[in-house]
Amino acid sequence: INLSLEKVIDKKEQAEQDLQYLAYHDELTGLPNKNLLVDRINQSIKTASRDKQKIAILFLDLDRFKNINDSLGHTIGDTLLKEVSDRLYKTLRSHDTISRNGGDEFVVVLERLKNTNEAIHVAKKVINCLTDPFDIQSHKIHIGASVGISIFPTDGDTSLILLRNADTAMYRAKQSGGNQLQFYDKSMSNQLRDRLEIEAELHGALERDEFYMVYQPQIDCATGRTIGFESLIRWHNDKHGEIGPDRFIPLLEETGLIYAVGEWVVSEVASFIQKHHVDGITFSINLSALQCNDLGFISYVNKVIDKTGIDASQMEFEITETLLIKDFEKTKVFLDGLHNIGCAIALDDFGTGYTSMNYLARLPIDVIKIDKSLVRNIDVNTNLQSIVRAIVTMSVSLGMKNIFEGIETSEELAVIKNLKGHIIQGYLFSKPLIENDVNDWLASDTSLRLVK
């Protein structure tokens, strides 16, 4: 009896130890979890205050992890997280704390710092150790890391503030392209506050009718006639005034508002075509990657076309190259759906990504839009001319039209006409126009004069 009682007590003690361990450690990697991390930071703050030393908090987020998880599956994602934690553990000093904060976020606490250069040195080591590819189940996986750094005592005196500020700095590192480090500074908090304010305003913008459309003419290189417009969304907010699309479109995606706003754009453009009887002219609409995952969008477009009675071929949808790489098969189903309705498909920013000929041949693409980075200074850069000549030849052989974006000088225009470009768009002809100005534009022969 005594023996079995001892066993029960041992098991109970073991279970308590296990629970204690789980309360403070991450189950997948065995690293300290957020609870233990906060304890360690608090401990470090006490020691550093006493000894007049600095602490650095490194907030680390893996670049491209979500794509890997989505495309290769959670099992490979979990293995990758374990291998990341092993590499980090081997890279750091024994008295540094490394913790998994959840998802693909890790936090490193650097104690006993003499100066901030030490934090830079460690952050660079961390980024470098994750740059080498990971070999997992015969997949070669490349990731990077965005690192945000906050320093005690200058950037905060509690674990919560230090973690929040390091997280803010990490977000900035990610926005700047990833695989880099960024120190926290106070202006980031102001930026974050502005961002939250704009996000709050964005939620009611559609109901308050604050969005409007502008249209940039697209001109046939041979005839000088306007044959299309790129439809661009703009936002004028009562409180903040005009807010640029580079600021609000990422927020639309993050908040999920992109679906409702995307549908609004479609109905707005279709109504414009119906109201102004602009026959034979195409209106292109930019699509977000999120919209391309939503097959319900296709039936919405179909419904709008039926309701307005416009010709489906007057609506063109633009996707970017990066979308093809993310999820080719899903994108193909989506684009085929739009194409079957009769809408045209354009591939935007061509020349900036990695589109292979194989992709282009398998997709229902009608138009290639050549990015403005390949147009800028094309009149003096012969390398650019060779690249663009090859793109034009390729588009013709695939039966696709090509549009050149961002033309600003008559010299650039002359080269593109010489290279047999089809369609041109840019400030040399016109900035994006509000609705009333589109009618004036079409009624005049401005475009004809400019091209001749």
Image: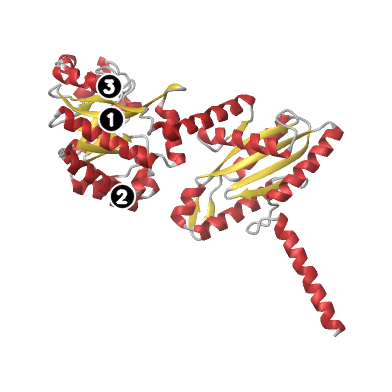
For this rendering, which residue is in front, 298 or 264?
Answer: 264
- Quarter of the image for residue 54 reads top right
SS state under label 2? helix
Image-based side of 40 in relation to 288, left or right: right
Per the rendering, the mark at residue 434 is 3
Neighbour class for label 1 at 10 Å: few (<14), some, many (≥20)?
A: many
For this rendering, which residue is in front, 193 or 205?
Answer: 205
Neighbour class for label 2 at 10 Å: few (<14), some, many (≥20)?
A: few
Task: Write down the residue under mark 1.
Answer: 231
Amino acid type at image mark 1: Ser
Residue at 22% in and 42% down: 304
Residue at 64% in and 30% down: 184
Task: Write down the residue under mark 2.
Answer: 296
Quadrant holding the C terminus? top left
Real-space Cα distance between discs 2 and 1?
A: 21 Å
Quadrant holding the N terminus? bottom right
Residue at 23% in and 37% down: 316
User: Which x, y percent locates residue 44?
Assistant: 79, 40
Residue at 61% in and 45% down: 129
User: Which x, y percent locates residue 113?
Assistant: 77, 34
For this rendering, which residue is in front, 313 or 180?
Answer: 313
Q: Is residue 410 visible?
A: yes
User: Which x, y percent locates residue 344?
Assistant: 21, 40
User: Which x, y percent locates residue 364?
Assistant: 23, 46
